[in-house]
Image: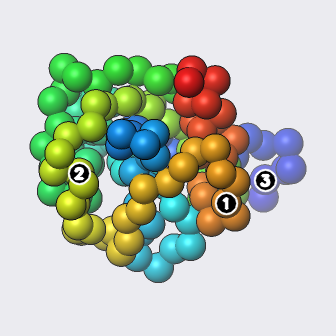
């Protein structure tokens, strides 16, 4: 039995912010879920967060990113969108727009992708986006 003061389990992930020429951010929604989130996913044992970001982006969207062009936006914590009672700790990287992203299609567990304006509040966004990533992006614009 756990007490209410026990910390929530932490899920460590990497995620990628890719913006188009209008400043919109590419987001995905996994099959069977309701929240849009950044492309990315869980680290494999011993995997560098940058390598996770590149691997997951390619698995989900079929687009190879250049590891050396990833810029650290930050490491952020928020409530996990799809796993109640968990916290997500995300190493978030920005990558310059690549033309293939304009016509990307959902792969693997991804059901939907959408370019989202980070300045427009939406109820269908993951807490990581609304609570920390989008405010960080808007603070830099």
Query: Is residue 103 or residue 31 the one in the foreground?
Result: 103
Which residue in the protein does label 3 denote? Answer: 2
Picture quadrant of residue 131: top right
Circle 1: element type: loop
Question: Which image quarter: residue 96?
Answer: top left
Which of 111 and 101 lies nearest the eye of the viewer? 101
User: Which label number is shown at residue 122?
Assistant: 1
* Distance from Cα at disc 2 to Cα at disc 1: 22 Å
What is the x, y in percent for residue 30?
41, 68
Residue 73 shown left or right of residue 130 in the figure: left
Whether residue 109 is visible, yes or no, is yes
Q: Nearer the viewer, mark 3 or mark 2?
A: 2
Residue furthest to the bottom in view is 32
Q: Is residue 78 above or below residue 74?
A: below
Q: Answer left or right for 17 relative to 86.
A: left
| Residue in front for this viewpoint, 121 or 14 | 121
| Residue that appears at 40% across and 76% down | 31
Q: Earlier in the sequence, mark 2 or mark 1?
A: 2
Residue at horizontal 17%, vertical 45%?
99
Which label belongs to residue 101?
A: 2
Local crowd size for mark 3, using a 10 Å CA cut-off: few (<14), some (14–19), many (≥20):
few
Instruction: Residue 19: give x, y in percent of width and height.
Output: 38, 40
CA separation, marks 1 and 3?
34 Å
Of helix, strand and loop, which one carries label 2? helix
- Point out the image quarter for the C terminus: top right
Q: Residue furthest right?
A: 4
Alpha carbon of mark 3 to alpha carbon of mark 2: how far?
A: 44 Å
Of the two numbered discs 3 and 2 on the same chain, state the one appearing first in sequence.
Answer: 3
Which is more N-terminal, label 3 or label 1? 3
Image position, residue 72 (x, y; %): 40, 21
Instruction: Answer few, some or many: residues within 10 Å of disc 2's Cα (few below 14, many 20 plus, some between 14 and 19).
Output: some
The residue lying at 31 percent from left, 70 percent from top is: 109
């Amino acid at each position: 039995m756990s007490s209410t003061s026990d910390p929530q389990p932490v899920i460590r992930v990497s995620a990628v912010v890719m913006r188009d020429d209008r400043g919109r951010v590419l987001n995905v929604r996994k099959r069977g879920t309701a929240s849009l989130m950044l492309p990315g996913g869980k680290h494999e044992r011993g995997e560098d967060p940058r390598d996770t970001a590149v691997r997951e982006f390619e698995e989900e969207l079929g687009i190879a990113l250049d590891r050396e062009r990833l810029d650290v936006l930050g490491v952020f914590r928020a409530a996990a969108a799809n796993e109640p009672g968990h916290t997500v700790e995300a190493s978030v990287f920005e990558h310059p727009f690549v033309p293939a992203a304009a016509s990307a299609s959902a792969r693997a567990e991804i059901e939907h992708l959408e370019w989202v304006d980070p300045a427009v509040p939406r109820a269908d966004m993951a807490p990581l986006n609304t609570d920390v990533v989008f405010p960080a992006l808007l603070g830099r614009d």
